[in-house]
Image (cartoon, helix red, strand yellow):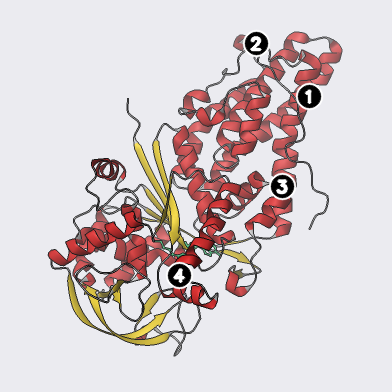
């Protein structure tokens, strides 16, 4: 049976600065889904990349005394190496300065022009360069200040090309009504619908006062407005606009996207402008856009300009990559703003990872070495099973479905909690069954049964923590003498009770999450 396609994307990030905790957050969330969907047998295509055009990037280059191309080429590797450090398994990385992208953008313009969706006009209004966003006079809450980021807006007057966005008000409303899953979570959907109900203005889609962008094919001196340029990455990366049959096949296979991950600040671009652009070009809109909240430190949005940003590298160095990924997805409820702190990270690390997960693995692997010479016992006779055994089997048995349910809603916290139910029970199970006493008493049958059951709980827990903590899960499977966990493509079958083969070599190894004593 051929695998169902699953296309997931992150926003493409501005290269005015290096990656930070906010951009890493979106990327880790998308990666966890991509990894999980590979485990559920999907043919995943995971795209991320860089937004390299526009005034903001041109300005950053100028400030550094280099050409825009030199600037973007110097920043791009900081992203690819940060994603490597964080274990991001993207299948494609697009940069908007690539030819494949420019070609697609130009094909898109030609199509919209030919079909009468564009016209020439004059734009007069305000522009926020850091957000690359147009604002009308009445949208400004305070004169001269961007209502979104609070930075200075500039008055611009230009001859521009316009996209007839206003004509898509009703089609968009109909689309939202027919596709209730399109904007997520629910609160964001209401925000988008009421914005569109308020009426849409045509959108200026070209700029003439600078040249760092994709030239509009039929309009000399005009380059593409950077947001339009950026949104198109989701289709140009698949091959939109190319005559090559391989590109066309890829586009047909993966489009429409299953999930576009975005931050809540860029939802209008993705849920209003983007589907309208696609409708105009006769392309189906994506299946869903999920907007997550902001990471806050001491109540403020964390950003480089506010100077309150820790770097991903500094945290990975201190906590390790898996604990980093775990903290952000477990502690911040996805879709809401969430406060993050080093104190919170240490607490999660020591509590959930060192005490619960790490400790469970260590003591169990140790006991298997000590009492059974490191060989996994045979699966015990179920007819002789104790109440605790049955309870643990039941918890493990419902985990695949519960986990799937949470992951479908991108509720990472709840998904991880469901895995933790098994981990915590397994710890209690060991306490209650006291294998050390069984060993002392020479009850080898019960000892083998208890260790087998606990090892099974660990094997299954590793499957469901793998999307978020891939390195630890791979290591746990190695220590259980099992194969490569990333090769699992049917997580439900793999999670069936009794999968640990008799005689599998179990090794103890070092602590997976050594406890941290420097609390802050
Ligand atoms: N280039 C545009 C996206 C174009 S997509 C077609 C852009 N880039 S960005 O680099 O500024 O931001 C990318 C993402 O990072 C956004 O989704 C934004 O919400 C997210 N974050 C930036 N700071 C953040 C936090 N403090 N917290 C969580 N995410 C935030 O916008």
Q: Is 123 displayed left or right of 507 in the figure?
A: left
Quarter of the image with the N terminus in it: top left
Q: Residue furthest right?
A: 440
- Which of the two labelled residues, at mark 4 and mark 2, occupies the earlier sequence position? 4
Q: Which mark is residue 14?
A: none
> Eyeballing the image, is 54 above or below 44?
below
Between residues 505 and 265, which one lies in front from this camera angle? 505
Which label lies toward us, 4 or 3?
A: 4
Q: CA distance from mark 4 to mark 2?
A: 64 Å
Q: CB atoms at circles 2 and 3 under 8 Å apart?
A: no
Q: Residue at x 54, y 50 (%)?
A: 28
Please provide percent x and percent y for residue 385: 64, 14
Q: Is mark 1 within 8 Å of ligand 1?
A: no
Q: Is residue 422 above or below residue 242?
A: above
Residue 508 image point, x, y percent: 75, 26
State the residue at coordinates (78%, 19%).
369
Pointer 4 residue: 68
**Residue at 71 percent of width and 47 percent of height:** 349
The residue carrying pointer 3 sits among few (fewer than 14), some (14 to 19) or many (20 or more) residues within 10 Å by Cα, namely many
**Residue that badge 3 annotates:** 349
**Which image quarter is the C terminus in?**
bottom right
Q: Nearer the viewer, mark 4 or mark 2?
A: 4
Q: Mark 3: which secondary structure?
A: helix
Residue identifier under label 2: 378
Question: Which of pointers 4 and 1 lies earlier in the amino acid sequence?
Answer: 4
Mark 2–mark 1 Cα distance, whole angstroms, equals 18 Å
């Amino acid at each position: 049976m051929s695998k169902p396609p699953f296309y997931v994307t992150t926003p493409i990030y501005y290269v005015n600065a290096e990656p930070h905790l906010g951009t890493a957050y979106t990327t880790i969330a998308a990666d966890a889904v991509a990894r999980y969907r590979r485990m559920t047998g999907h043919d995943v295509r995971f795209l991320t990349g860089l937004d390299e055009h526009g005034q903001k990037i041109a300005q950053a280059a100028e400030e550094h005394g280099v050409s825009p191309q030199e600037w973007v080429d110097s920043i791009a590797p900081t992203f690819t190496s940060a994603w490597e450090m964080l274990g991001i398994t993207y299948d494609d990385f697009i940069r908007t300065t690539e030819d494949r992208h420019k070609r697609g953008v130009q094909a898109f313009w030609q199509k919209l022009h030919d079909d009468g969706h564009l016209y020439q006009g004059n734009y007069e209004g305000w522009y926020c360069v850091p957000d690359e966003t147009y604002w009308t006079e009445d949208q400004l809450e305070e004169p001269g200040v961007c209502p979104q980021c609070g930075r200075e807006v500039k008055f611009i007057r230009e001859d521009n090309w316009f996209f007839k966005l206003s004509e898509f008000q009703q089609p968009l409303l109909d689309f939202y009504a027919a596709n209730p899953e399109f904007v997520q979570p629910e609160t964001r959907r209401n925000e988008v619908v009421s914005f569109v109900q308020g009426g849409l203005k045509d959108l200026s889609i070209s700029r003439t006062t600078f040249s760092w962008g994709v030239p509009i094919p039929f309009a000399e001196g005009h380059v593409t407005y950077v947001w339009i340029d950026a949104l198109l990455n989701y289709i140009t990366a698949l091959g939109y606009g190319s005559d090559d049959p391989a590109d066309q096949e890829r586009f047909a296979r993966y489009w429409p996207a299953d999930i576009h991950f975005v931050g809540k600040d860029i939802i209008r671009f993705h849920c209003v402008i983007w589907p309208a652009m696609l409708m105009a070009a006769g392309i189906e809109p994506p299946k869903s856009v999920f907007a997550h909240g902001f990471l806050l430190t001491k109540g403020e949005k964390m950003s480089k300009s506010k100077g309150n940003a820790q770097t991903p590298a500094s945290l990975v160095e201190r906590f390790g990559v898996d604990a980093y990924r775990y903290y952000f997805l477990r502690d911040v409820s996805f879709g809401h703003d969430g406060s993050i702190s080093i104190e919170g990270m240490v607490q999660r690390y020591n509590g959930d990872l060192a005490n619960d997960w790490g400790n469970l693995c260590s003591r169990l692997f140790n006991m298997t070495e000590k009492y059974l010479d490191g060989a996994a016992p045979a699966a015990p006779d179920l007819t002789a099973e104790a109440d605790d055994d049955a309870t643990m089997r039941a918890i493990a048995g419902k985990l695949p479905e519960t986990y799937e349910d949470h992951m479908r809603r991108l509720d990472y916290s709840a998904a991880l909690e469901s895995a933790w139910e098994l981990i915590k029970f397994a710890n209690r199970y060991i306490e209650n069954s006291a294998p050390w006493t069984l060993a002392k008493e020479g009850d080898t049958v019960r000892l083998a049964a208890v260790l087998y059951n606990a090892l099974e709980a660990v094997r299954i827990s590793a499957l469901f923590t793998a999307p978020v903590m891939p390195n630890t899960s791979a290591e746990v499977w190695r220590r259980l003498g099992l194969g490569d966990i990333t090769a699992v493509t049917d997580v439900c079958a793999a999670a069936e009770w009794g999968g640990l083969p008799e005689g599998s070599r179990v090794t103890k190894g070092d602590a997976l999450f050594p406890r941290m004593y420097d609390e802050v």
